[in-house]
Amino acid sequence: MGMIIQGATGDWEVVIGLEIHAQVTSKSKLFSGASAAYGAAPNSQVSFVDAAMPGMLPVINEMAVEQAVRTGLGLNAKINKFSVFDRKNYFYADLPQGYQISQYLQPIVGEGKILIDLKDGETREIGITRLHLEQDAGKSLHDQHPSMSFIDLNRSGVPLMEIVSEPDMRSPEEAAAYVKKIRSIVRYLGTCDGNMEEGSMRADVNVSVRRVGEEFGTRCEMKNINSVRFMQQAIIYEANRQVDILESGGTVEQETRLYDPDRGETRSMRSKEEAHDYRYFPDPDLLPLEFDGAFIERIRETLPELPDPKKARFIKDLGLSPYDAGVLVAEKEVADYFEAVAEGRDAKLAANWVIGELFGHLNRTGKDLADSPVEAPALGDLIDLIKDGTISNRIAKEVFEEMFDTGKKAADIVEEKGLKQVSDTGAIEAAIDAVIAANPDKVAEYRGGKDKLFGFFMGQVMKATQGKANPGVVTEILKPKLDG
Ligand SMILES: Nc1ncnc2c1ncn2[C@@H]1O[C@H](COP(=O)(O)OP(=O)(O)OP(=O)(O)O)[C@@H](O)[C@H]1O
Ligand SMILES: [Mg+2]
Ligand SMILES: [Mg+2]
C-alpha cells in the first residue's frame, strides 16, 4: 500500500528511490593493500595510495570485484562484461586525491530486480537500476576540538558498492522493506556485513510527491542515513514538507538535504544550483574491467540459496504460511537453525517453536540466535517429546523455559521434575472420579444442558494431575462418565 498524503486540494502520492552504499566484505581496500577493518585507531590503516601521495598508483582488489559480481547476481541483475572506473572530482578535506574513484556511465552491474516482503507475506517487485564499485572517502571529525577539525583516513579507499534502485517505492514501509531485503541478500551472499550502526550500510534517500497517476515530481535527496527507523521518519517529514510547499502554490527545488534525527526534520545542505559538477572522466591509472562468461558462471555456481527461493521452498515443500516462511528466511542463521530443527519432523510445529517460544525468549533476554542457550538439536529433542506423547504442549513450554535458563536437555528436565505425561488410564480415571465426586452441583448443571462446563472438568482434572494427564485420554474417559 502506498502512502497517500491528503492535502486541502487533493491527494498526494509519495515516490521513493534509494542509493545504498554497502561496504564490500574485504580485508583490504579497493586500490591498496591497507586494512579495511572497522574500529582501528585513527590513521593507522592508511597506505600511500589512500593518502594520495604523488606518483602512487591504484591497483584493483580482485576480491572486491568478485564480491560486486556476486552481489549483482544476487540482485538478479545483468553483469556488464566491460566496465570502467571514473574519477568523480570534488574538493573536500577528507578526500586527499581531490576525486573519488567510482563508476559512472559503464558500471559493473546493470539492471536487476528484487522482491520486498510486505505485511501478511505479500511481496512486491522493486527495480534495481545499477550497482557500481567505488572507494569511500576519509572521515572528518568536527567534535574533537573547539576550533579544529581532524581527518581520519582509515576509511579512505575502503571498497563500497553503490546499489541504486528505481523510484519504485511508495511508502516508508516499502523503503524499510527494501533496505531489509538488500541487507538480507548481501548477508546471505557474504558480500557485506550489513551493519548499519558501524556504517557498513548507509542509504541516500530520494523523495518526491505527485498527484496519483501523474508524472514524477522533483526529488530531494537525504544523504547518509544509517538506521531504518530514521529513514522512515525522514521520508514522512520530507514528503509532508513537499506537500505543504506544493499546496501553497510553491515549487520543490531539487536539493540535497540533511536529516536531523534529534529534531526530526530535514535541512537544506546544497541546492541543485550549487550542485557539484563532478566532471567525471575515465581514470587513466586504471584499466577497464573485462570479464568472460566463464568468470561470471564460476561465481554464479557458488551462490547460496537466497531468501526468496528459500521462502518459496518453505511454503511449497514444508507447508509453512508465507508469513512464517518470510520470518524464517530473513536471516540465513535463522533459516539454517529452523531447518536443523525441522529436519525429519513436523515443519509447522518446528516453525511455531522457533518463531513463538525461541524468538520470544531471545527478545525478552536481548540475545541473538548465535548466543541462544538452546541449540537446534536440543529444541528438536523437545519437539520429539511432544510428538511421542511424553509431555503435553503446555508442559513443553515449561520445559523450554528451563532449557533456556539452564541449558539443560529436555529429557533430563522431564525426568528430574517428573513431568512425564500420564496416559495410564487407571491413574487418570481415579483423578476424574475424585473431581466428579467433589462437584455434584456442577455435574447436575452439566447434565441439565450446560455443555460449556466440560472445560471446567478438564481443568480440574489437569490441575489434580499437575498438568501431566494426557488431555486426549482425559477427554476419552471423562466424556462418558459425565454424560452418565
Ligand atoms: N522523482 C523521483 N522521486 C524519487 N526518487 C527519484 C526520482 N527520480 C529519481 N529518483 C531516485 O533517485 C536516485 C538517483 O540516484 P543516482 O545515483 O542515479 O543519481 P544521483 O543521486 O544524482 O547521484 P549521486 O550518486 O552523485 O548522489 C535513484 O535511486 C532514483 O530511483
Ligand atoms: Mg548515486
Ligand atoms: Mg544520489
Image (tube, rainbow, N blue to C red):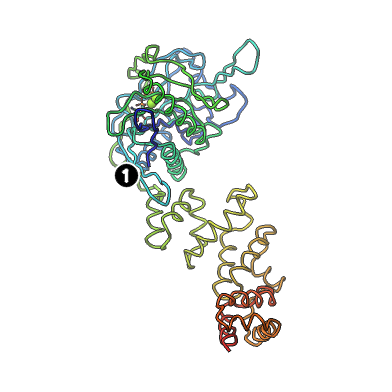
Residue 115 lies left or right of residue 159; in this view the side is left
480 lies above or below 176:
below
77 lies above or below 335:
above
Q: Name the residue at 57% across, 20% down.
A: 152
- Callout 1 secondary element: helix
Viewer-proximal residue among 477 and 61: 477
Please state the horizontal and vertical placement of residue 250, each as a whole percent of the image: 36, 18
388 lies above or below 63:
below
Please state the horizontal and vertical placement of residue 337, each as a whole percent of the image: 52, 56
Q: Quadrant of the N terminus?
A: top left
Q: Quadrant of residue 445?
A: bottom right
Q: Amino acid at mark 1?
A: Glu
Q: Name the residue at 39% across, 14% down.
A: 276
In the rendered image, the residue lying farthest to the bottom is: 484
Determine whether the beta carbon of the residue marked 1 sits less than 8 angstroms from the nearest atom of ligand 1.
no
Q: Name the residue at 56% across, 75% down.
A: 452
Please state the horizontal and vertical placement of residue 51, each as a whole percent of the image: 51, 17
Q: Name the residue at 58% across, 26% down.
A: 262
Viewer-proximal residue among 210 and 397: 210
Please state the horizontal and vertical placement of residue 319, each as a whole percent of the image: 41, 63
Task: Check disc 1 and report the residue beneath it.
Answer: 297
| Quadrant field for ligand 2 | top left
Viewer-proximal residue among 186 and 436: 436
